[in-house]
Amino acid sequence: MEASMEPIHTEPIRTDFTGYEGQYVALDWRTGEIVLADADPHVVLREAKDRDHVVVQGRVPYPDEPTRIY
Amino acid sequence: MSPSSTTPVSAEHERPTWLYPYRQDAQLGWRGEMVLRPLLPVSLVNGDRGTSRLAGLVASGADLTLVSDVLAEQLGIGLEDYEGEGDHLAAGGVVRARYKTIDLRLHSPDAEQDEYREWRSKIGFVENCWYSNGLVVLGNVGFFDQFEVAIGGPSQAVAIAHDRGDAAG
């Protein structure tokens, strides 16, 4: 990888997760828009399979759940 | 010095660096601040079966790549036939992981392209997985040992170069 001190300017992809708390979600990877949501992860994984541009992100936490630090 | 000596031998084999903008995580973060994280589109493959594309969290502090055991069903993997197991501290608690060797794919940042890099590694399937924010954590074994990875601060992006290992797709 070439070394560079120049910052790379990119726009983070933002998603509105409001209203999906407790559900597993899949996004359109180009836009960040939620296109699938279900409380059962198997449903989201199955429905996302073979869909173009769709990526399963995981479960949206409730506001009172502890913040995850990895 | 011959003219050709000025050109690196590996130039014709070099692949472009892939640049992934940070993405918003589902959690709002500390005191309401929005959290942007290095999330990459990855999938897991076991023979002729594979998972959906998944958002993998790049986690340089993770020793091992860990995934949720809910993915084992899509892969047709029986976790009773594992290659070892161990406890890991992750997501604020201890998780039990069973190790399996499978193929992983990193997909192009351009969602319009089908290009990907594939490699084979032992990873950990986690029982009773962390409940939120994702199904895949990309750690040192199973990810960082395959690519040159640069995680930007102000850049808010992940740059992946392909000059380590034989990852190909």
Image (spheres, rainbow, N blue to C red):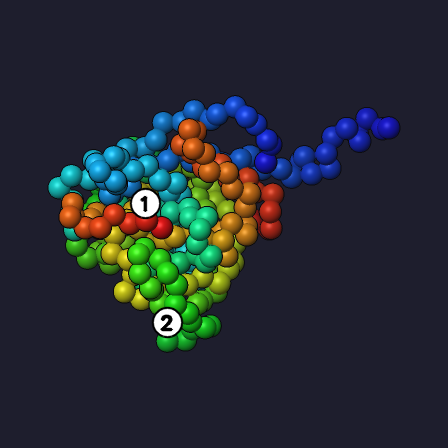
- Name the chain letter of the residue that bears numbered label 2: B
For image coordinates 51% across by 42% down, the residue present is B149
- Name the chain letter of the residue that bears numbered label 1: A
- Work out whether residue B33 can be spotted: yes
Q: In the image, residue B26 lies at what x, y percent? A: 25, 43
Q: In the image, residue A16 lies at what x, y percent? A: 20, 35
On screen, residue B54 versus residue A59, left or right, reads right
Q: Are marks 1 and 2 in contact (CB under 8 Å)?
A: no
- The amino acid type, in three-letter code, at marker 2 is Leu
On screen, residue A22 versus residue B159, left or right, reads left
- Please, which residue is most extreme toward the left here? A19
| B44 versus B26 height, above or below | below
- The residue lying toward the viewer, choosing from B38 and B78, is B38
Q: In the image, residue B45 lies at what x, y percent? A: 43, 58
Q: In the image, residue B10 lies at what x, y percent? A: 69, 38
Give the residue pinned by disc 1.
Answer: A55
- Few, some or many residues within 10 Å of mark 2 (<14, 14–19, 20+): some
Give the residue pinned by disc 2.
Answer: B79
- Work out whether residue A33 can be spotted: no
- Please, which residue is most extreme toward the right here? B1
- The residue lying toward the viewer, choosing from B67 and A66, is A66
Tag 1's secondary structure?
A: strand
- The residue lying toward the viewer, choosing from B125 and B150, is B150
On screen, residue B163 versus residue B77, left or right, reads right
| A68 versus B73 height, above or below | above
- Few, some or many residues within 10 Å of mark 1 (<14, 14–19, 20+): many
Q: CA distance from mark 1 to mark 2?
A: 24 Å
For image coordinates 31% across by 43% down, the residue present is A54
| B76 versus B51 height, above or below | below
- The amino acid type, in three-letter code, at marker 1 is Val
